[in-house]
Image (cartoon, rainbow, N blue to C red):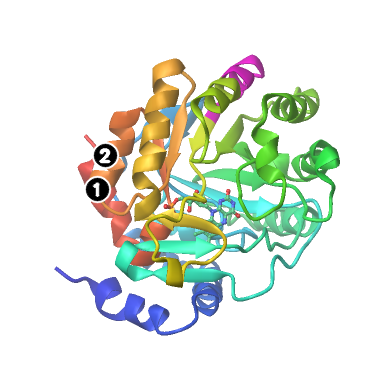
C-alpha cells in the first residue's frame, strides 16, 4: 500500500536534482526543529519504544540515522521527533570545506541505490560546535543519543590526519554520546588508508590520550571493500585500543550492479551494498564480541532483520530513508522482537 511519502513526497523530491532535493529537505527539517507543534505532530507517528543498551548507552530503539544526511547538525530535534533511537551527525572536519565539484549525488531508482562523491562538504568543527552549544543552552536538545562523526579535512596531508581528527574531537566531544572516526569514505583521497593497522592504531592512540576525563565511547566506521586479513587487523587494533563499536559499513567502490553507461565515480549505497555489508558483519561477529552498528542497504524490515541476525546490535539508515521515507522507521521497529 502506498503511503503519503510514496504518493507525494518522493515523486516531488525525485523530480528535482538530488542535491537540491537534499538541501530542500534539510531546510524543512531545520525549520521544523524550531516549531514545537510540528515536532509534537511528528512524534505521534514515531515508533513505540524498543529499548536497547550497547557499549554503556541506553537507546530508546536500535534504529539510527546514518552519517551524511545531517552533516552540520542542524535538525537534531526533528530527527528525534521522527522517532530515531540515535542520530549521527557529520562527517565533520577540522576545517570548513565545500566538498567536490557538483553534480556529486546520483540516484539509481531501479537499483534502489545512490552514488555520492560529496567529499565531506561541511561547516567545520568550530562552527558546528557553536551551533550545538546554542542548541544545548536553548533547552531544545532532544532526548536522543547523538553520535558525532569526524573525518580528515581535504587539505590536510594524510600524514597529519591524527592531529586533524584530534582538533575536531576536542571541539565536539562534549556534545557527543559517542564519537565516530570515519576512516572509510571513498571521496577523500587516502582516507581509507587510515584503516591500515599502524595508521589506525596511531589515530586511536592520539584520540585516546585526550579521552581520559569524561571518556566518550569511540566508534570506528569501516568500508565494505576489505580483504579478510585487513578486517582481522582492524578488529585486533580496535580491541587493543578499547574501541566501543564498529560501524559496518560505509559505501562501496564495487559498482558492478550499475550499468557501465550510467556509472559515476563515488561511493555506492543502498540495496547493492546490502549483502557485502551483512557478510562483513558476520565476519566481525565470528571473530570478536565488539559491538557492531550495521549500515548498508537497509531498505525494509527484512534487510534490517538480516543485520541483527548477522550480529549487529544497532542499525542505521540513509538510502532507505530517501527511497522509503520516515515510515521505514516504524516498519523496522515493528519487525524487532
Ligand atoms: C549522499 C550520501 C552522503 C554520505 N555522507 C557520509 C558522511 O559524511 N560520513 C559517513 O560516515 N558516511 C556517509 N555516507 C554513508 C552512509 O552513512 C551509509 O554508511 C552508507 O550510505 C550505507 O548505508 P545506506 O545503504 O543505508 O545508505 C553517505 C551516504 C550518502 C548516500
Residue 328: name its quadrant.
bottom left
Pick whichever, 280 or 243, lies toward us: 280
Q: Quadrant of the C terminus?
A: top left
Query: Is residue 212 visible in this depiction of the protein?
Result: yes
Q: Secondary structure at mark 2?
A: helix
- What residue is pinned by disc 2? 305
Q: Is residue 86 above or below residue 27?
A: above
Query: Is residue 35 visible in this depiction of the protein?
Result: no
List x then y, in percent, for residue 219: 59, 33
- What residue is pinned by disc 1? 301
Q: Quadrant of the N terminus?
A: bottom left
Residue 244 part of the magenta-drawn span: yes
Q: Is residue 29 left or right of residue 209?
A: left
List x then y, in percent, for residue 257: 37, 57
Distance between the alpha carbons at the discs numbered 1 and 2: 6 Å
Q: Is residue 330 left or right of residue 103?
A: left
* Mark 2 C-beta to ligand 1 under 8 Å: no
Pick whichever, 33 or 138, lies toward us: 33
Q: Is residue 53 left or right of residue 335?
A: right
Residue at x 39%, y 18% (from the top left corner): 286
Residue at x 62%, y 64% (from the top left corner): 118
Q: Is residue 56 left or right of residue 94?
A: left
Residue 6: name its quadrant.
bottom left
Question: Residue most toward the front?
Answer: 260
Residue 72 part of the magenta-drawn span: no
Q: Secondary structure at mark 1?
A: helix
Q: Which residues are magenta?
A: 236-245
| Residue 273: numbered disc | none
Query: Decide: marks 1, 2 in contact (CB < 8 A)?
Result: yes
Q: Is residue 280 above or below residue 147?
A: above
List x then y, in percent, for residue 282: 37, 27
Crowd class of label 2 (few under 14; some 14 to 19; many from 20; radius 10 Å): some
Amino acid at each position: 500500500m502506498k503511503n503519503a511519502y510514496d504518493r507525494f513526497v518522493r515523486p516531488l523530491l525525485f523530480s528535482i536534482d538530488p542535491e537540491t532535493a537534499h538541501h530542500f529537505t534539510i531546510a524543512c527539517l531545520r525549520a521544523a526543529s524550531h516549531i514545537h507543534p510540528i515536532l509534537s505532530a511528528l512524534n505521534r507517528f514515531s515508533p513505540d519504544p524498543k529499548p536497547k543498551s550497547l557499549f554503556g548507552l541506553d537507546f530508546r530503539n536500535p534504529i539510527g540515522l546514518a552519517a551524511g544526511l545531517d552533516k552540520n547538525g542542524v535538525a537534531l530535534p526533528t530527527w528525534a521527533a521522527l522517532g530515531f533511537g540515535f542520530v549521527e551527525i557529520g562527517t565533520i572536519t577540522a576545517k570548513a570545506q565545500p566538498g567536490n565539484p557538483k553534480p556529486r549525488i546520483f540516484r539509481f531508482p531501479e537499483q534502489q541505490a545512490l552514488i555520492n562523491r560529496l567529499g565531506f562538504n561541511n561547516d567545520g568543527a568550530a562552527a558546528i560546535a557553536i551551533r550545538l552549544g546554542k542548541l544545548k543552552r536553548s533547552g531544545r536538545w532532544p532526548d536522543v543519543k547523538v553520535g558525532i562523526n569526524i573525518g580528515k579535512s581535504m587539505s590536510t596531508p594524510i600524514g597529519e590526519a591524527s592531529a586533524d581528527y584530534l582538533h575536531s574531537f576536542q571541539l565536539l566531544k562534549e556534545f557527543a554520546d559517542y564519537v565516530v572516526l570515519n576512516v572509510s569514505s571513498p571521496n577523500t583521497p587516502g582516507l581509507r588508508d587510515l584503516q591500515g593497522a599502524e595508521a589506525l592504531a596511531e589515530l586511536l592512540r592520539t584520540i585516546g590520550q585526550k579521552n581520559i576525563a569524561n571518556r566518550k565511547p569511540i566508534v570506528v566506521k569501516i568500508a565494505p571493500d576489505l580483504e579478510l586479513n585487513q578486517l582481522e587487523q582492524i578488529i585486533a587494533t580496535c580491541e587493543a585500543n578499547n574501541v566501543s563499536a564498529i560501524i559496518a559499513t560505509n559505501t562501496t567502490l564495487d559498482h558492478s550492479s550499475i550499468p557501465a553507461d550510467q556509472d559515476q565515480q563515488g561511493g555506492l549505497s543502498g540495496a547493492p551494498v546490502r549483502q557485502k555489508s551483512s557478510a562483513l558483519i558476520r565476519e566481525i561477529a565470528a571473530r570478536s564480541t565488539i559491538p557492531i552498528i550495521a549500515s548498508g542497504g537497509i531498505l525494509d524490515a527484512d534487510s534490517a532483520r538480516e543485520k541483527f541476525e548477522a550480529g549487529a546490535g544497532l542499525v542505521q539508515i540513509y538510502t532507505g530513508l530517501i527511497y522509503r521515507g520516515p515510515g521505514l522507521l516504524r516498519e523496522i521497529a515493528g519487525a524487532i522482537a
